[in-house]
Image: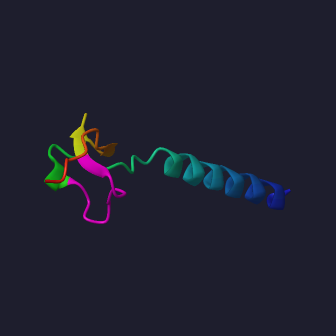
């Protein structure tokens, strides 16, 4: 009987830790581009912007004309 109670307690603790870890907000909060994490980078042909408090990479729409 005591083993069943211990098993239930362990299950409750496991599910609690699992649910808490699911609610972690792990996104970059930024106001300007310089606030973005230095480990975040964009692929070639894209540039970093700050939109709605998040760092995002956008595709460059304009291609410079070589002179």
> Could you tell whether 12 is left or right of 42 in the image?
right
SS assignment for the magenta stretch, majority = loop
User: Given the current orientation, which residue lies at the most extreme front position?
Assistant: 67
- Residue 46 x %, y %: 31, 50
Q: Nearer the viewer, residue 60 or 55?
A: 60
Rendered position, 14 above or below 60: below
- Residue 59 x %, y %: 33, 43
Q: Is residue 37 magenta?
A: yes
- Residue 50 x %, y %: 22, 42
Q: How is the image coloured?
A: rainbow
> Could you tell whether 39 is left or right of 18 in the image?
left
Rendered position, 3 above or below 62: below
Residue at x 25%, y 45% (from the top left corner): 63
Q: Nearer the viewer, residue 48 or 61?
A: 61
Residue at x 69%, y 54% (from the top left corner): 9
User: Given the current orientation, which residue lies at the most extreme top position?
Assistant: 52
Q: Nearer the viewer, residue 45 or 17?
A: 45
Q: Is residue 38 magenta?
A: yes
Residue at x 37%, y 57% (from the top left corner): 43
Q: Nearer the viewer, residue 31 or 43?
A: 43
**Numbered range of the magenta stretch:** 36-48
Residue 31, image quadrant:
top left
Q: Which quadrant holds the N terminus?
A: bottom right
């Amino acid at each position: 009987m005591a083993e069943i109670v211990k098993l239930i307690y362990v299950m409750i603790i496991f599910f609690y830790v699992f649910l808490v870890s699911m609610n972690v907000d792990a996104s970059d909060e930024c106001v300007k581009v310089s606030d973005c994490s230095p480990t975040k980078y964009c692929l070639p042909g894209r540039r970093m912007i700050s939109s709605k408090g998040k760092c995002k990479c956008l595709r460059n729409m304009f291609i410079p004309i070589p002179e």
